[in-house]
Amino acid sequence: MPRINLLPWREVERTRLRKEFFSAALAAVLIGVLAALVIRWQYGSMINQQKARNQYLTDQIKQLDGQISEINDLEQRKTALHSRIKVIEQLQQSRPEVVHIFDQLVRLLPEGVYLTEVTQTDRRIQIKGIAESSSRVSTFMRNIDASEWLESPSLEIIEAKGTAEAGSNFTLYANQVALEESADAVNKGNKNKERS
């Protein structure tokens, strides 16, 4: 039987296997590096897209904040305008009230009573004057109490001057009846007149 020496063949086979192993390892490393680069690029792209979205949202939020501040300014202007309109409406409604109050004061004033000063603060009216006697002041107060435009008279001061002929100085207060209440009273008075 002939002898075959397999040592050189084995050495060649080992060398070939070693080369294949290193080639496969190098290919695996290259594929791994390439995969890592692709994954890194993909994640970088996703991060950039998310940053762009975040920036867009930030810009939109700034725009909305500006619009909200404009809306708040408009709301404040609207509130101020409403309050001005309310004041103007109240002034328009109270216009005839002043005329009625002066008319009532003239009608309610008994003889021997003279007014020197009339001051109004909100619905409270201060009346100063001179009366020939305190009974005329009390008549004036009763007339005010029976009035449809004035109510709740209260005497603060009555002081006699030097002589009885000179009369007495007085200060009294009365409340103005609200326009709605006085209008109701006038309407009731008119209905009562119609019935009789």
Image (spheres, rainbow, N blue to C red):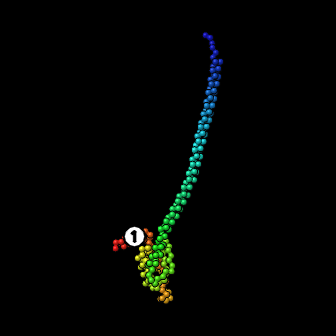
What kind of element bears circle 1? helix
Residue furthest out toward the top: 1
For the residue marked with disc 1, what is the amino acid? Answer: Asn
The quadrant of the rendering that contains the C terminus is: bottom left
Closer to the camera, 75 or 180? Answer: 180
Left or right: where 68 falls relative to 192: right
Q: Is residue 160 above or below residue 16?
A: below
Closer to the camera, 27 or 154? Answer: 154
Is residue 158 visible to us here? no
Location of residue 35 by image quarter: top right
Residue shown at the point (49%, 87%) measured from the top left: 166
Residue 157 position within the rendered picture, expressed as x and y whole percent measured from the top left: 48, 81
Q: Is residue 33 above or below residue 114?
A: above
Residue furthest out toward the left: 196
Residue 56 position within the rendered picture, expressed as x and y whole percent measured from the top left: 58, 46
Q: Which residue is mark 1?
A: 187
Would you call the spot at circle 1 few (<14 residues within 10 Å), some (14-19), or many (20 or more)?
few
Residue 147 position within the rendered picture, expressed as x and y whole percent measured from the top left: 42, 75
Closer to the camera, 154 or 100? Answer: 100
Q: Is residue 139 above or below residue 84?
A: below
Residue shown at the point (38%, 71%) measured from the top left: 190
Is residue 8 visible to us here? yes
Residue shown at the point (42%, 74%) measured from the top left: 148
Closer to the camera, 41 or 122? Answer: 122
Residue shown at the point (65%, 22%) measured from the top left: 15
Residue 49 position within the rendered picture, expressed as x and y whole percent measured from the top left: 59, 42
The quadrant of the rendering that contains the N terminus is: top right
Location of residue 183 by image quarter: bottom left
